[in-house]
Image (cartoon, rainbow, N blue to C red):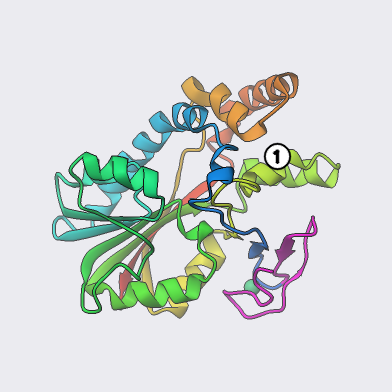
């Protein structure tokens, strides 16, 4: 049934916009009682992996380049673990600077990434690590929002970071424009965008929505010092329509309308709250 208490501040969560959505009235954290279906054959038939990849790859890679430059301001070498490394796009770029390791729970994706020669383990963090294993950098790229018990994961991060090790997290921002628009549409009874923002029905739906303030508060409660926060782009013009089609799903007429709407908004998007935020924090 998802979280009853806010994982950030402990407040009892209130009813949100749908039967599965809850919100914290104290710190604005949001939660969804959606169940992951990784490795279930049926769930995979719902994803259009190709459209997903083609719409997102260019964007993700340019975001990764930016993030790597930010990480290197604090750590220039050592060991780096990416939790949920998927196809290995991030590790392929960081292996120039770090000894890289990955963890990936999806069997098919894992097999492909392993074939690229990357040092990846099949399974979940931290179960697949040895008890005393420690890394200089641990990275979660669009992963933390999928993991039900974030406090347990952050405790494990501290255990598996070296002294002054860095934790790097990027994830969707509940203050972001796309998410705010999806909530507005949901209040007007158009639920499909809101469901897509949570990845409802996909193998690994989102179970949390944080913002820059409540996630920083959560990290501080785990004795992590936030060194840097910033934003990553959500849209690039070249892949905007593909992205909208992926998020919007079915109706192409409606997708076209949303695409035109976002296109009109494009010049102001850069000054509005971004849909992806990142955090670089150091172990105290
Ligand atoms: Zn809260």
Is 9 included in the stretch rendered in magenta?
Answer: yes
- Image quarter for residue 261? top right
Tally the marks.
Answer: 1
Q: Quadrant of the N terminus?
A: bottom right
**Circle 1 residue:** 193
For the point 66% across and 77% down, the residue is 5
Q: Main secondary structure of the magenta part?
A: loop
Q: Is residue 98 visible?
A: yes
Camera-nearest residue between 158 and 33: 33
Residue 150, horizontal then vertical, whole percent: 49, 70
Residue 259, horizontal then vertical, whole percent: 65, 23
Q: Is residue 274 visible?
A: no
For the point 56% across and 54% down, the residue is 37
For the point 48% across and 75% down, the residue is 151
Vertical side of 246 occupied by 108: above or below: below
Left or right, 121 with respect to 58, comes to left
Vertical side of 76 occupied by 248: above or below: above
Q: Quadrant of the C terminus?
A: bottom left
Residue stretch in magenta: 1-25
For this orientation, the residue located farthest to the right is: 188
Residue 49, horizontal then vertical, whole percent: 49, 33
Is 83 included in the stretch rendered in magenta?
Answer: no
Camera-nearest residue between 58 and 275: 58
Q: Secondary structure at mark 1?
A: helix
């Amino acid at each position: 049934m998802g979280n009853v208490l806010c994982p950030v501040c402990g407040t009892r969560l209130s009813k949100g916009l749908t039967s599965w959505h809850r919100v914290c009235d104290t710190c604005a954290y949001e939660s969804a009682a959606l169940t992951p279906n990784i490795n279930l054959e049926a769930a995979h038939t719902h994803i259009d992996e190709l459209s997903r990849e083609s719409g997102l790859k260019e964007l993700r890679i340019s975001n990764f380049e930016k993030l790597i430059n930010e990480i290197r301001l604090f750590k220039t070498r050592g060991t780096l673990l990416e939790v949920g490394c998927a196809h290995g796009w991030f590790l392929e770029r960081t292996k120039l600077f770090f000894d890289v390791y990955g963890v990936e729970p999806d069997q098919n994706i894992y097999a492909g990434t392993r074939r690229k020669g990357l040092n990846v383990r099949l399974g979940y963090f931290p179960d697949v690590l040895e008890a005393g294993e420690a890394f200089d950098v641990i990275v979660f790229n669009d992963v933390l929002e999928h993991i039900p018990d974030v406090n347990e994961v952050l405790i494990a991060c501290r255990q598996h970071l070296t002294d002054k090790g860095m934790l790097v997290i990027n994830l969707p921002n509940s203050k972001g424009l796309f998410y705010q628009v999806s909530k507005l549409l949901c209040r007007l009874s158009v639920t499909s965008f809101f469901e897509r923002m949570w990845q409802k029905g996909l193998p690994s739906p989102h179970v949390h929505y944080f913002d820059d303030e409540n996630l920083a508060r959560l990290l501080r409660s785990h004795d992590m010092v936030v060194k840097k926060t910033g934003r990553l782009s959500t849209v690039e013009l070249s892949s905007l329509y593909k992205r909208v089609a992926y998020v919007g799903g079915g109706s192409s007429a409606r997708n076209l309308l949303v695409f035109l709407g976002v296109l009109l908004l494009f010049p102001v998007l850069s000054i509005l709250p971004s849909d992806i935020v990142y955090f670089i924090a150091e172990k105290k």
